[in-house]
Amino acid sequence: MGRSAQGDPPVLIQGGMGVGVSGWRLARTVSRAGQLGVVSGTALDLTLARRLQQGDPGGDLRRALAAFPVPEVAGRVLRRYFVPGGIPEGSPYRPVPRLGLRQSRALDELTVAANFCEVYLAKEGHDGLIGVNYLEKIQMATPAAVYGAMLAGVDYVLVGAGIPAEIPHLLDELAAHRRGEVAVTVADGDRQPVAVEPRRLFGRTLPPLPRPRLLAIVSSHVLATYLARTPRTRPDGFVLESPVAGGHSAPPRGRMTLDERGEPVYGPRDEVDIAKVAAIGLPFWLAGGYGTADGLAAALAAGANGIQAGSAFALCRESGLDPTLRDRLLREASAGTLRVRNDPLASPTGFPFKVADVPGTLADPAVYADRPRLCDLGYLRTPYAKEDGAVGYRCPAEPVDVYVRKGRPAEEAEDRRCLCNGLLAAIGLGQHRPDGYAEPPLLTLGQDVGFLAELPEDHSATDVIEYILTGARVRTA
């Protein structure tokens, strides 16, 4: 199995899959095999809080918190959320502070500590490369989250679902423990900064940090060229993602049209001109349907440094998916009965989102209809300017009448799923309400699952790596 040297770009990137699907166990396994293991940075504050409330079986999170460079911060997180032995089964989890433009010290401490823990555990016991993946759509969490990952020595930061033009400068500032900020767009208002100030947060100055490399996840050579135009916005490389990749994908350019299955139609304008990206001179990887030996061979032939693969890792033993749900996906995919549709409405972000049609999940119309609409986590809510000048927050997945009162048409809320709660339930961290209602899961996967025919029935992450790299070496030798 090929190993990337510490200073060399990896050949295979294990894609970041949230919430919690690509956790530290998966990323560590991939990294120890010589490739780039990536943890998802989405909602790590909440996953840490809920796992501590489950009693932290095995003590991994407490071990990571014991290594946090500011012990009093780790102590406050433990006192707020750790429950020895875990909360009773079916009990509601204690909430965490919600994201907003106004900074919350408690949330900043939790976010920094949570990202530190996930990267620390992924890097523990080896010297391989570890990355962390963030969504530009969740800007209000980015500065504190990135800082926590950097405190643990993360090697790569990957950012998609938007235009990560501010991230290179953010990394520069945080490496020196200076104030790091990004500007958040307020609908009908001005852009406002959200920041983390390390010295104010910790009350001390820590030694300088290594600056991680930044990979921008894009679906357009135009965007890649735009980002590369100046040092302030230039990443260290690109992941070029096609529309068949799991999770969110960019909408088609121009007016959206749907096919007979209700999925967005992509055309020639949506294809990345790989030659134009190669001409930029930065490393790049291809993603979305490339997670096979043939896919890697094709990517290398096109001038790419390698590929990013997600779905094969999402279905492996080290995946963070709830084991029962993972087994159902494997059975249905192997039987050829699994349908993964690119739903143009499911995500509150407005981006198409891959939804695995599995009965009993939020993909099931009956389950969706029975779920009380609410937005109590708010990772995908967006700020807007009220008539009185104050800032409010809204999400198309909240109750329709509430959304309409916030100035938006009811049609925008039609068929929206609560991704925050659904994806947490998919990794066994779903909320239980005081009335006994349990949040149903929502599952996402790439639309190409043909790789399963080449893998063992209950495959591991190393099986995936060996299959892709060994086959590629045969084909390119």
Image: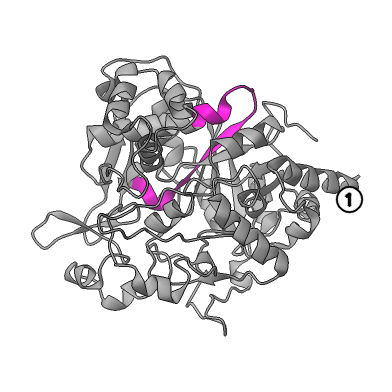
Image spot of residue 43 (x, y percent): 40, 45
State the residue lying farthest toward the bottom.
Answer: 260
**Dot 1, how many residues are within 10 Å of its Cα: few (below 14), some (14-19), or many (20+)?**
few
Image spot of residue 338 (x, y percent): 63, 69
Dividing the picture into quarters, in which one does residue 108 lie?
Answer: top left
- Per the image, label 1 sits on a secondary structure element best described as helix
Instruction: Look at 44% across and 29% down and name the residue there.
Output: 61
For this rendering, which residue is in front, 417 or 226? 417
Q: Which residue is mark 1?
A: 475
Q: Is residue 205 above or below residue 239?
A: above
Image spot of residue 461 (x, y percent): 69, 42
For this rendering, which residue is in front, 385 or 112? 112
Dividing the picture into quarters, in which one does residue 11 lie?
Answer: top right
Instruction: Look at 34% across and 23% down and name the residue there.
Output: 74
State the residue lying farthest toward the left.
Answer: 388
Image spot of residue 148 (x, y percent): 41, 30
Q: Is residue 40 magenta?
A: no
Magenta region, residue range:
119-139
Specify the amino acid type for callout 1: Arg
Can residue 157 be seen by looking at this rendering?
no
Instruction: Look at 79% across and 47% down and name the residue there.
Output: 467
For this rendering, which residue is in front, 292 or 228? 292
Q: How many marks?
A: 1
